[in-house]
Amino acid sequence: MTTRERRLVAGTVLVMSLPLALVMAMTRQQPLLSSAAYEWSRMPVTPTAVGEKRTVLDGPTHTLANLEIHVTTLNPGEFAHAAHQHPEEELMVVQEGTVQALVQGAFTKVGPGSVIFQAPNLMHSIQNVGRTRAVYHVIKWRALPTAAQKP
């Protein structure tokens, strides 16, 4: 084998290895979430410009590609973020305060104990419309692909 042929083979191997390395990195699995209890005082708290966020969990389960649960605290008058949409379904459970949620194009005012369900790909947002802080739990999930969705 000539030097030119060796360089050609080495270059080809390098070029062909890059996509494989990318695929392996992209499909690297996080460990599946297991049964657990999450104590309020141990949840990591992240201050935000509009209040704070407590992360409960975020990862794959046995039946979901991803399950994310966090708790948002909104200061009076604040929106969590601008109206947006995403492909995942999302459930919000109001713990305290009064919020208005953008649901199917209209704002709906709800209080403690209320549940808000946001279907996929619909614009939604949430605002604290009370005089005290609002606290709500967010549960967002992404399903595993079905047989019909798999390539």
Image: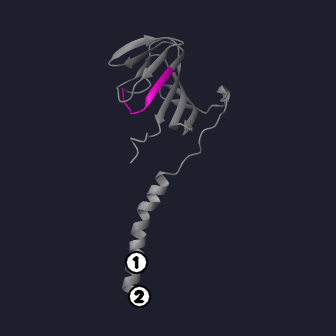
Does residue 22 appear left or right of residue 57 in this picture? left
141 and 107: which is toward the camera: 141
Please check the rendered image and state whether residue 91 is part of the magenta-colored stretch, yes or no.
yes
Q: Where is residue 121 in the image (x, y as percent from the top left)?
A: 35, 30
Which residue occupies the extreme left position in the image? 105
The furthest residue to the front: 147
Q: Can residue 134 be seen in this view?
A: no
59 sits to left or right of 77: right
What's drawn in magenta, residue-wise? 83-92
Kindly check if marks 1 and 2 are in contact, taking CB atoms under 8 A apart as contact.
yes
Q: Is residue 90 visible?
A: yes
Q: Which quadrant would the N terminus be assigned to in this image?
A: bottom left
Residue 111's mark?
none
Identify which amino acid the numbered label 1 is placed on.
Val
Tell me the number on the disc at residue 9: 1
Q: Name the residue under label 2.
A: 1
Precedes in sequence: disc 1 or disc 2:
2
